[in-house]
Image (cartoon, rainbow, N blue to C red):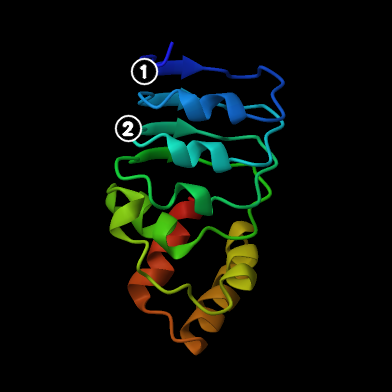
Amino acid sequence: MTNLRFLNLFGANLQEITFVKNLTQLTHLNLQRNNIKDISPLAHLPHLKFLHLTHNPIQDISPLKNLPFIFDFTIDHTKLQAPPIWYAYAKWERKPFSDYTHLTELPAVEKIWQLMRTKESENLQLAQQLAKSQGWTAEEIKIYQNLVD
């Protein structure tokens, strides 16, 4: 079973995924619609390219940042406070996370992200103003807005 490359556990009512760390040849993993909070076992999957974690109570995706090949990744409807900058850039440019892990987090990202996620025009304007006042570039603002769309 260690040679398994595709695994679909959509809606399997999983709460923990420690068993996957031994599936080191996995390239595709679907864990959508479970109750997974800790994704640290995924850090042991160096060949992972496609990962779907939508609808899980995940708050931290940092265990994924050094995976060299992930480029198709979904994490909508989680408890993530704000996507890290390395995730935002990788998603925008469709490149591996590891290409961007050197980037420094943006100031006030959680508040700006909360405003952007409402999709209300007043909040979007406020988010842009706040981001600019915190030194965000136009590109960084656009990248985060793209994540909301």
Mark 1 neighbour density, 10 Å: few (under 14) some (14–19) many (20 or more): some
Q: Residue at coordinates 52% horizontally, 54% vertically from top-left?
A: 62
Q: Mark 2 belongs to which amino acid?
A: His
Give coordinates of residue 134: x percent, y percent.
51, 86
> Residue sitting at 41 percent across and 16 percent down?
2
* Residue 33: % across, % down: 65, 27
Q: Which residue is mark 1?
A: 5
> Height in image: 102 above or below 20?
below
Classed neighbour count for the residue bearing mark 2: other residues with Cα under 10 Å, few (<14), some (14–19), many (≥20): some
Point 64% across, 34% down: residue: 55
Question: In the picture provided, is 134 more to the left or to the right than 25?
Answer: right
Circles 2 and 1: CB atoms closer than 8 Å:
yes
Residue 125's place in the image compared with 49, above or below, is below
Give the mark nearer the N terminus: 2 vs 1: 1
Q: Position of residue 121 (x, y in %)?
A: 58, 66
Question: How far apart are the alpha carbons under marks 2 and 1?
Answer: 9 Å
Query: Which kind of residue does numbered mark 1 sit on?
Result: Arg
